[in-house]
Amino acid sequence: MAKKAVYKPRDWKSYNQSLVQRGSLTVWIDEEVLTNWHPEPEGQRQRGGQLQYSDQAIETLLMLRAVYGLPYRQTIGFAQSIFNLIGAEVKMPDYTLLCKRGANLEVDLGVTAGDEAKHLVIDSTGLKIYGEGEWKVRQHGYSKRRTWRKLHIGVNAVTQQIEAVVLSEAGLDDAEAGKTVLEQTPGDVEQASADGAYDKAKFYEASTERGIKRIAVPPRKDAKIWQHGNSNQPPLPRDENLRAIRKGGRKKWKRESGYHQRSLAETAVYRFKTIFGNTMSTRTLSRQVTEARIKIAALNRMTRLGMPNSYRVA
């Protein structure tokens, strides 16, 4: 059995400093947030009162909650103590308001724009809503109340930033969610890579409509050609993949197509769960969507602080 490859970072000093910076409050709170904490009056409203706290203020509090793993009430107390120490004269929303505003908050993932067409790698994972812990499951097994959400992400293979995220119920198949991931991804996408769960016509059709030139999704082992070679229509990307696999083998196709870059999406999932855990703290789907996007935005900010430049140990 081959030994697992071992990697070491070349830039350990700078990467270590970026890890330290992740805990700095200055990374998560800046002057712009304090300036825009209370929005300007919008004039006479037809119904209801004026918003007392901007979306940016709510997003900042929710991000502090996610990064430092705090409940709603402790988040308010934590933020109030920080602003008191720096002498910022801002009021804190009630924890119930913070919870309510989180249901419909539009969260920007904070992706750095680039001019080059990207290689998008896609993967999904499960996040527990509620249910038993590992010890109880080992002792007594699962119960019917064990419920999950599926997190689908699209990662830029070069920058390793997560450019699109979809949170869905557990019953939604990966290919359907992958279509939404492609729709959400900004800019030009040159290649999309995903595992065999995305080997469905609807994902290929969405990729073609998106203008993606190369689709690296391994067909099933019992896959058949969809379109005959004598057809007047352009060859289907999935059929081209299947023909290349039949000719040179699956291992060669994965290497030549760049499919192995898909492991970067698995690494992003691992980083997400290592930092934020595998459990959702909110209970409704709308708030869970906001929670997931808040965590992804925080993860992208951590990525921009610095990533390791590793080399394989011989």
Image (cartoon, helix red, strand yellow):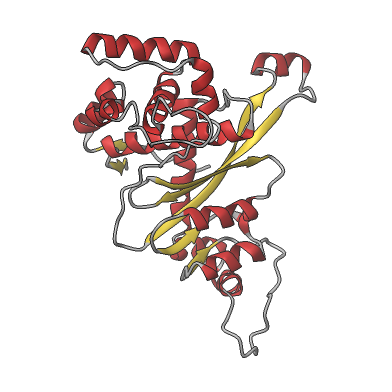
Residue sitting nearer the eye, 30 or 296: 30
Kindly identify the residue that appears in the image at 50 percent across and 61 percent down: 254
Residue 96 image-quadrant placement: top right
- Determine whether 259 is above or below 140 in the image: below
Quadrant showing the C terminus? top left
Residue sitting nearer the eye, 112 or 286: 286
Q: Position of residue 57 (x, y in %)?
A: 37, 27
Residue 168 image-quadrant placement: top right
Q: Is residue 302 visible?
A: yes
Residue sitting nearer the eye, 281 or 227: 281
Q: Is residue 38 left or right of residue 166?
A: left
Q: Position of residue 216 (x, y in %)?
A: 52, 62
Q: Is residue 180 left or right of residue 42?
A: right
- Determine whether 204 is above or below 271 in the image: below
Kindly identify the residue that appears in the image at 58 percent across and 39 percent down: 125
Q: How many marks?
A: 0
Residue 132 image-quadrant placement: top right
Q: Position of residue 153 (x, y in %)?
A: 51, 46
- Determine whether 73 is above or below 292 in the image: above
Kindly identify the residue that appears in the image at 31 percent across and 62 percent down: 116
Residue sitting nearer the eye, 6 or 205: 205
Q: Is residue 71 visible?
A: no
Q: Is residue 217 left or right of residue 3?
A: right
Q: Position of residue 236 (x, y in %)?
A: 59, 76
